[in-house]
Amino acid sequence: MQVLAGFAAMGVRHSRQREALLQKEREVAAAAMANDLAHQINNPLQSLTNILFLAESSGGGRDAKELASHMSKDFQRLCVLVEKLLSLPKP
């Protein structure tokens, strides 16, 4: 009876370990995807941020400067979010 109980306990432990390993693999895959997306978003975001900076500081019309100023705040928030994603530990 004890042998059977030991065998069943070993099976349960093995099942739990396998599930924990699968969960860890899913987390690593999600982190890798988040990192890849953050890099893909960061490149065009930086380009757009630079364009907005040029629009704000150029000698263009007042409306263009106001629009660029308003948009740059939102772009700055996006930049901060992308930086947070990029600072996450790499898988």
Image: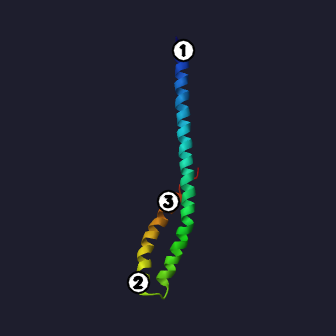
* Amino acid at pointer 3: Lys
**Residue highlighted by disc 1:** 4
Q: Does label 2 or label 1 sit earlier along the sequence?
A: 1
CA separation in Å, label 2 and label 1? 80 Å
- The kind of secondary structure element at disc 3 is helix
* Amino acid at pointer 1: Leu
* Amino acid at pointer 2: Asp
Q: Determine if residue 10 is in view.
A: yes
**Residue highlighted by disc 3:** 84
Q: Is residue 6 above or below residue 85?
A: above
Q: Nearer the viewer, residue 89 or 28?
A: 28
Q: Position of residue 59 (x, y in %)?
A: 48, 88
Q: Which numbered circle lies on residue 63?
A: 2
Identify the residue shown where x is 56% and y is 37%. Answer: 21
Q: Position of residue 58 (x, y in %)?
A: 49, 85
Q: Residues within 10 Å of mark 2 (few under 14, many from 20)?
A: few
